[in-house]
Amino acid sequence: MAKRKPDPHDIDSYLPLPASAMHIIVALAAGEKHGYAIMRDIDDLSGGSVSMGPGTLYGSIKRMIDQGLVQETDERPDSTLDDERRRYYRLTALGQRVGAAEQARLTALLSAAQVRRLGLGGLT
Amino acid sequence: MNLLLQVALLAFPRSFRREYGTEWTRTIADMRNHSNQSALRVGGTVVAEAFTTAIQMRWENLMKPTKTVLSVLAATIALAALVMGSAAIAVFAIALVVLVGLQFAGKDRPITPTDPSITRRWYLWMAGAAGAFLLGLGVVVITEEDGGLSSTAWATWMLSWATAAVLAVIGLGATRLFTHQR
């Protein structure tokens, strides 16, 4: 499959998203978070089956910032409860659109899997 | 363990260390403080993951044009010098130093998104390898005489095949790292 360089005017050019990027988007969909909170959220949402290391996390965040999917924010949810030095990240409008498009893509894929009864031995 | 983490951090490209090194370290401290696993286990996992991702980031940097051309040139000279014999060991060593220096001491560009089109570039690397291989073969076929090859022809043959080997390794590496990436 030929792939293109992502173009902000063409959401499909970002798809399929790397799994790590989609996990981060889902984590940030609930609001801005710092790195460790994103890692914890990914771990919780996956029931512990996905454990993202800090290298993968910040490598992915760096790429997503470069692509305009995520941005760093100066705002703090509650500065009295957290370390001011932490860096917080949030989804951009583009990131939300790309996340929604990836969700639609994955939903369609899962629907196809269900139709073919993949989970019930459809391949046997 | 802290020393080991600092060493692991050095494995990352300079641009990443500069921009995310502090956050990376702070996040690991959070992991150690809040995890119910031992600090040793957390540290070991983090270090292993760091080297894996650092290699990938450096490979991405390597695939960028300017650095790639210089690295391929240095690796080719090194390989050819090694094959040519002891007189060229000095060249080999210098080339190796250049190659390593480019990777670890050079000024990194910012980490950019993996260009999806790079999955197609491995064909170009392999085509280049095939071309270099055929060039070397052609030199042997055309210039070989009863007395064997002249020193110039032999050097050209070795240089061509060394180039082919380096290009093929890079092409295969690009295939493995990028077409199967996540």
Image (cartoon, coloured by chain):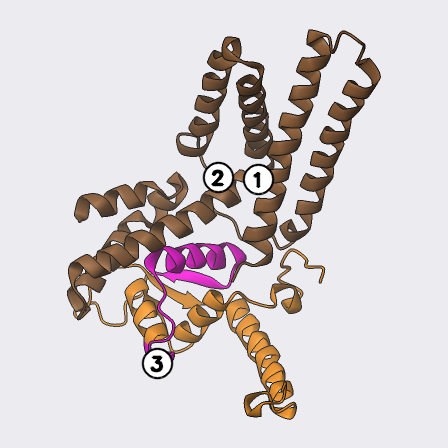
Q: Do the residues labelled 3 and 2 touch (CB within 8 Å)?
A: no
Left or right placement of residue B92 versus residue B69 in this view: left
Label 3: which secondary element: loop
What is the tally of numbered marks visible in this picture? 3
Task: Say above or below: B16 vs B29.
Answer: above
Left or right placement of residue A57 versus residue A8 in this view: left
Task: Say above or below: A123 vs B103.
Answer: below
Colour brown, chain: B
Residue B21 drawn at (x, y percent): 30, 48
- Does the magenta-highlighted stretch encompass residue A55? yes
Colour orange, chain: A
Q: Are marks 2 and 1 in contact (CB under 8 Å)?
A: yes
Estimate the spatial distance between the alpha carbons at disc 3 and disc 1, rounded to whole Å. Answer: 38 Å
The magenta stretch is A44-73
Given the image, on which type of amino acid does mark 1 rest?
A: Lys
Q: Residue B109 carries which label?
A: 2
Residue B1 drawn at (x, y percent): 17, 49
Mark 1 neighbour density, 10 Å: few (under 14) some (14–19) many (20 or more): few
Mark 3 neighbour density, 10 Å: few (under 14) some (14–19) many (20 or more): few
Residue behind mark 1 = B64
Camera-side residue: B138 or A23?
B138
- Does the magenta-highlighted stretch encompass residue A34? no
Residue behind mark 3 = A47
Subunit bearing disc 3 = A
